[in-house]
Amino acid sequence: MCEKIVKAYWLHSGFIEPTNKSLVHFPEIWITFLLYQCPLKIANVLMVDTNMETALQWANELGSSPMLPVSLENVDSRARMVNAIDTPLVYKEVILERLNPQEKSLRMNNVAKTAAPYMQEIDDASVRLNIVLRLYSGCLSAAKAIALQTNDGPNTPERRAEQAVTVDFIAQSDMIYSAGAEAAPSFKRLRREAFSLDGIPKNSVIRKRFERMAKGQTL
């Protein structure tokens, strides 16, 4: 993971990709420095899925992370909303960053309308979009991390741990994205998809509400 972080900084700073030899001599203390100095650049490189990266980028274009609406305090409500907007956003399995402005606008309008019933206290469509895109990015990124299968084959505890680092890193500075990641287990259950937390760190945001769910506590 440290190697990926250093490469992310190097490449986004316009330098050539570092060699493995140069990485060996990169002090650990500088890893922490880079995480705080260029979090968005690094987060984009480490993103689990390009559509999740694009959704978060579009949300950032709409403003900073808002407060989580009362209507979405329950993780099951978040999971249902993310599930509802998934098709309007990415139907035909499109790569979001390749959409032309007209198609992007059409999809954003459809997503805002679909999300409206789930947060009726938010009248401003742009604020709704900001919220739902962050929730979507966090939820789907975490859901992919805990999936049993990936496009490359079976998921592993090592890959889950690596993906959880990315999710938790972004969640530290974005409470809506974090709320989306919390809802990932509920999202998988809603879709009746098997998942595993094997490899997800015990202090990960992905586990936060799931542990309470398992104990029968209020979500």
Image (cartoon, rainbow, N blue to C red):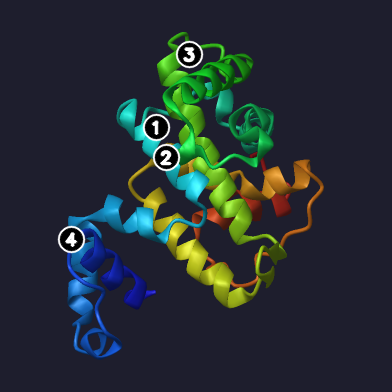
Give the distance between the C-alpha atoms of the residues marked 3 and 4, in whole angstroms. 39 Å
Between residues 123 and 141, which one lies in front from this camera angle? 141
Pinpoint residue 52: horizontal percent, then vertical percent. Answer: 50, 45
| Label 1 close to label 2 by CB (< 8 Å) | yes
With 150 as the anchor, is 133 left or right in this view?
A: left
- Is 63 located above or below residue 196 in the figure? above
Element on which disc 4 rests:
loop
Residue 206 sits in which quadrant?
bottom right
Amino acid on which disc 3 is placed: Ile
Per the rendering, the mark at residue 122 is 3
Pinpoint residue 158: horizontal percent, then vertical percent. Answer: 56, 77
Q: Is residue 42 visible?
A: yes
Amino acid on which disc 1 is placed: Ala
Query: Which marked residue is nearer to the observer: mark 1 or mark 3?
Result: 1
- Is 167 located above or below residue 27 in the figure? above
Circle 4 is placed at which residue position? 13
Q: Which mark sits nearer the N-terminus, 4 or 1?
A: 4
Between residues 194 and 4, which one lies in front from this camera angle? 4
Query: Which marked residue is nearer to the observer: mark 4 or mark 1?
Result: 4
Circle 1 is placed at which residue position? 59
Question: Residue sitting at 58 percent across and 57 percent down?
Answer: 207
Element on which disc 3 rests:
loop
Q: Which mark sits nearer the N-terminus, 2 or 3?
A: 2
Give the distance between the C-alpha atoms of the residues marked 2 and 3, in whole angstroms. 19 Å
Amino acid on which disc 2 is placed: Leu
Circle 2 is placed at which residue position? 56
Residue that extends furthest to the right in the rendered view of this protein: 192
Element on which disc 1 rests:
helix
Query: Which marked residue is nearer to the observer: mark 4 or mark 2?
Result: 4
